[in-house]
Image (cartoon, grey):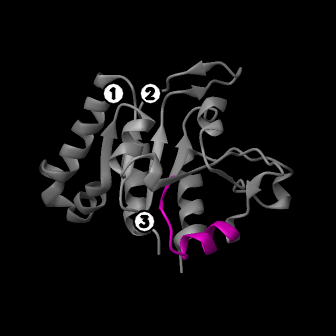
Amino acid sequence: MRRVAVALVHHPVLDREGAVVTSAVTNLDVHDISRTCRTFGVSDYFVVHPIEAQRGLVDRIVTHWREGSSAARIPDRSEALSVVRTVGSLESAIGALGGRAAVEIWTTSARAGSDRLPLDAARAALREPGKAVLVVLGTSWGLAPSVIAGCDRVLAPVLGAPAAGGFNHLSVRSACAILLDRLLGP
């Protein structure tokens, strides 16, 4: 099994009109995605944010659960947050995994396309020898095109049931959990 890491990017991402913006960190994204990553054996969960104050917020959240009163009260959460790493850029996350030559970058998109890697094929690829894989998720309305263009593969979207009538707007926390289950679950 190849090493798998996850990056949650807050910049550059898109707003609802398609403009490139920086989104804010949310406690739930830090907390819940780290639990999902730890559950599926992900080596690192990078929270990517260019603003130092936002990275500091992530560090305070992690410290609360790893060393504060909640660490003694709910030890499993402390373990889950052990995979969180705060970085200022996607390039820093890639560097932490050994640099671009050592990492395949896979991204996600809620949009379908002919170039999307089916999740069953991605799952099979993870079981073959190869480079570490960094799965890149975007906040807000998705990753900026410049991020997607720099990735090696774009994964097929997580789709809902036909009964949903085409509605497809999962939270990044939910999409991450479903995606990791399909890629790394039993």
Picture residue at 42% right of the left edge, 37% below the top: 91
Q: Residues within 10 Å of mark 2 (few under 14, many from 20)?
A: few
Occupied quadrant, residue 89? top left
Residue 2 is inside the magenta segment: no
Mark 2 lies on residue: 24
**Disc 3 element:** loop
Q: Could you tell me how many numbered marks the image carries?
A: 3
Task: Relative to 94, say whether 36 is above or below.
Answer: below
Picture residue at 64% right of the left edge, 32% below the top: 141
Q: Are marks 1 and 3 in contact (CB under 8 Å)?
A: no
**Left or right of residue 183: residue 169:** right
Cα gap from disc 3 to disc 2, whole angstroms: 28 Å
Picture residue at 38% right of the left edge, 54% below the top: 34
Q: Position of residue 61 (x, y in %)?
A: 26, 41
**Left or right of residue 158: residue 132:** left
Please name whichever residue, 36 or 114, is drawn nearer the observer in this view of the structure. 114
Magenta segment boundaries in residue numbering: 121-134
Occupied quadrant, residue 44? bottom left
**What kind of residue is marked 2?**
Ala
Q: Are marks 1 and 2 in contact (CB under 8 Å)?
A: yes
Q: Are marks 3 and 2 in contact (CB under 8 Å)?
A: no
- Give the mark nearer the N terminus: 1 vs 3: 3
Which quadrant would the C terminus be assigned to in this image?
A: bottom right
Q: Position of residue 71 (x, y in %)?
A: 16, 56
Mark 3 lies on residue: 3
In front: label 1 or label 3: 3
Mark 1 lies on residue: 54
Is residue 27 visible in the rendered image? The answer is: no
